[in-house]
Image (cartoon, rainbow, N blue to C red):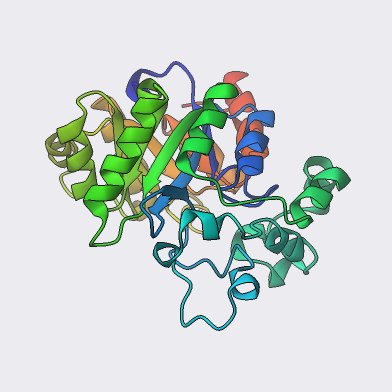
Amino acid sequence: MKLETSPRILNIAHRGARAYAPENTLVAFAKAKTFGCQMFEMDVRLSKDGVVIVHHDEQLTRCTDVVKKFPGGNNYKIADFTVEELGRLDAGSWYIAQLALPNTERLPFLYSLTADEMAQFVSPAERQLYASGAVKIPTLMETLALAKNIDMSVNIELKALRDNSARLVTGVLEVVEALNMENNVLISSFEHDLLRQIRQQSAHIATAALTEIPLKAPLSYLRQLKVNAYNLACYKDLKHNDFSNRASQRYLAHIEKIRKANFGVNIWTCNDREELRYLLAAGVTGLVSDYPNRVREIIAAYDAGFIKS
């Protein structure tokens, strides 16, 4: 996957279309396809028995009913549960409980979810499914099989513990290669040594350096890492500063510099339409969002010439 030469701006669904389905589940990934996303992003960790599992948090408590299923535990880390035990958990009902709350009492990424969006993109049948207990934590194998079946690419973010990073890298590569998905994945991580490990074992699988703040001397660093892309956090003060102060302009110029060097630049996680417009105009290759419908709207406006670079 050569993101730096992609002819289209990628609409990348963050943890699947997680504003409209339980994050990091097969239903969220399938939902991303309905918004025209070319790619979804997700996170991987290792289970106790070494299976690559798709889940963001180290702890299982936010997005599953693990405390109910396994009461009395001191902690609930994924690494302390086997894949069979993880398969017993309900990974969907928490999302329905969030929808029942007033906006300001929900998790922050759901603050801006409107009643119109909820009505349009979360059907009664989907609500019933998400609350049924049938939504489970998927394995990487199940997730990539789904992606292959629905013709989507996948951004795999590595979430390793200190003592299992090498096993996670090897496990991910084994699954990717078993499904012949080498040309359809982008592997990213905040732990850049993991990207070095990926590159040592595969010369052609695309990788991306994840970072919260702009890198210093980014071009030499990215070249040294031998990555294909730069997954940079959305600058949170862009809108607050009307996109015109020096810090905002430096941020946008930073993006332009990386793009001119032919690296992909994918910005996460941006849910605000005005910020999306400015980021598109700055020349990004991908936008990672909880609300892929909003990204779709802005890309359509850009393609129609209503947003100028």
Quadrant in which residue 262 is drawn: top left
Q: Is residue 73 visible?
A: yes
Instruction: Relative to 100, say whether 249 is above or below.
Output: above
Instruction: Relative to 67, say whether 229 is above or below.
Output: above
Residue found at x 82% / y 41% = 120
Instruction: Relative to 190, say whether 208 is above or below.
Output: above
In the rendered image, residue 282, in percent from the top left (x then y), is placed at: 42, 34
Quadrant in which residue 69 is drawn: bottom right
Residue found at x 23% / y 34% = 227
Quadrant in which residue 30 is drawn: top right
Residue found at x 32% / y 34% = 174
* The N terminus: image quadrant: top left
Q: Residue furthest right?
A: 124
Q: Nearer the viewer, residue 169 or 122?
A: 169
In the rendered image, residue 210, in percent from the top left (x then y), is placed at: 32, 47
Q: Is residue 280 visible?
A: no
In the rendered image, residue 125, in percent from the top left (x then y), is placed at: 85, 44
> Is residue 204 found left or right of 125 in the rendered image?
left
> Is residue 242 found left or right of 265 in the rendered image?
right
Residue found at x 23% / y 61% = 163
Q: Nearer the viewer, residue 53 or 216?
A: 53
In the rendered image, residue 101, in percent from the top left (x then y), is placed at: 77, 69
Label count reads 0
Q: Nearer the viewer, residue 81 or 157?
A: 81
